[in-house]
Image (cartoon, grey):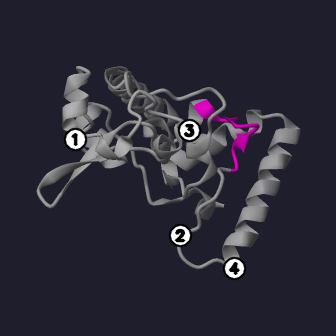
Amino acid sequence: MFKIYEKYLEAIDEYLSKCFKSQGVFIHCKSGCSMCCEVGEYPFSRLEMEYLMNGFPELAVNVQVLIKSKIKELKLRKKDFSGRFMHECPFLIEKKCVLYSRRGVVCRTFGLASFEQIDGRPVIKLPECSRHGLNYSEILDTSKLGIEAFQKYGVSGPISHSLSLNYFEKEIIRGVNSLEFGEIRSMLDWF
């Protein structure tokens, strides 16, 4: 099953590469910035989680021990928490993902501008890092970022659809069959 999933990831990565290139004048992810991995819930499907964890045994033993310790600590903290439990990804070590090539779709799509229709008009959705000067650095006031700004820079625009497993499965990877993603949970809930 992982061979088919890897074909799926190749198709997604090819598509996302075009999206990131299209939005290049806005996207300025900086080396060492890991804000997207420091606060989140990280929704993963069963298949994504199995693929991620399939790479776990390849990590150095001391890294495995550190990740297991982080997971144990997070689960203890979550037990006494009500509501959305936002946390650092346990696979983030020294501001880098130790299983980057096996990351989920939510990780692969982070940083792209997208929009959703609210009250009949498109509202630009930017990652949180843009509010901290860590991304989209050519646009200093992101609160005024609209479709016109994308057009001014020759960018086709923000992505006008959900960057979800469902979208990719139905629209991007036609022909890659037999994938069962399974239930989607926050990463921590898989442990």
- How crowded is the residue under tag 4: few (<14 C-alpha within 10 Å), some, or many (20+)? few
Q: Is residue 167 left or right of residue 111?
A: left
Q: Inspect the image, locate mark 1, and give the three-letter code of the amino acid beneath it.
A: Ser
Q: Between 129 and 87, which is closer to the camera in this rendering?
A: 129
User: For mark 3, what is the residue?
Assistant: 103
Eye-nearest disc, 3 or 1 = 1
User: What label sits on residue 160 in the rendered view?
Assistant: 1
Residue 91 colored magenta? Answer: yes
Looking at the image, the residue that sits furthest to the left is 120
User: For mark 4, what is the residue?
Assistant: 80
Disc 3 from disc 2: Cα separation? 22 Å
Q: Point out residue 124 in the picture as x, y percentages from the top left corner.
A: 28, 45
User: What label sits on residue 113 in the rendered view?
Assistant: none
Q: Earlier in the sequence, mark 3 or mark 1?
A: 3
Q: Is there a contact, CB below 8 Å, between mark 4 and mark 2?
A: no
Q: Residue visible at 62% across and 35% down?
A: 33
Does residue 125 appear in this view?
Answer: no
User: For mark 2, what is the residue?
Assistant: 84
Eye-nearest disc, 4 or 3 = 4
Disc 4 from disc 3: Cα separation? 28 Å
Quadrant of the image occupied by residue 19:
top left
Q: Residue visible at 66% across and 31% down?
A: 32
Q: Earlier in the sequence, mark 4 or mark 3?
A: 4
Instruction: Classify 27 as above or below 88.
Output: above
Q: Point out residue 153 in the picture as x, y percentages from the top left corner.
A: 26, 21
Residue 142 colored magenta? Answer: no
Q: How many marks?
A: 4
Disc 4 from disc 1: Cα separation? 38 Å
Q: Residue visible at 59% across and 44% down?
A: 35
Q: Inspect the image, locate mark 3, and give the three-letter code of the amino acid beneath it.
A: Arg
Q: Is there a contact, CB below 8 Å, between mark 3 and mark 1?
A: no
Q: Between 144 and 48, which is closer to the camera in this rendering?
A: 144
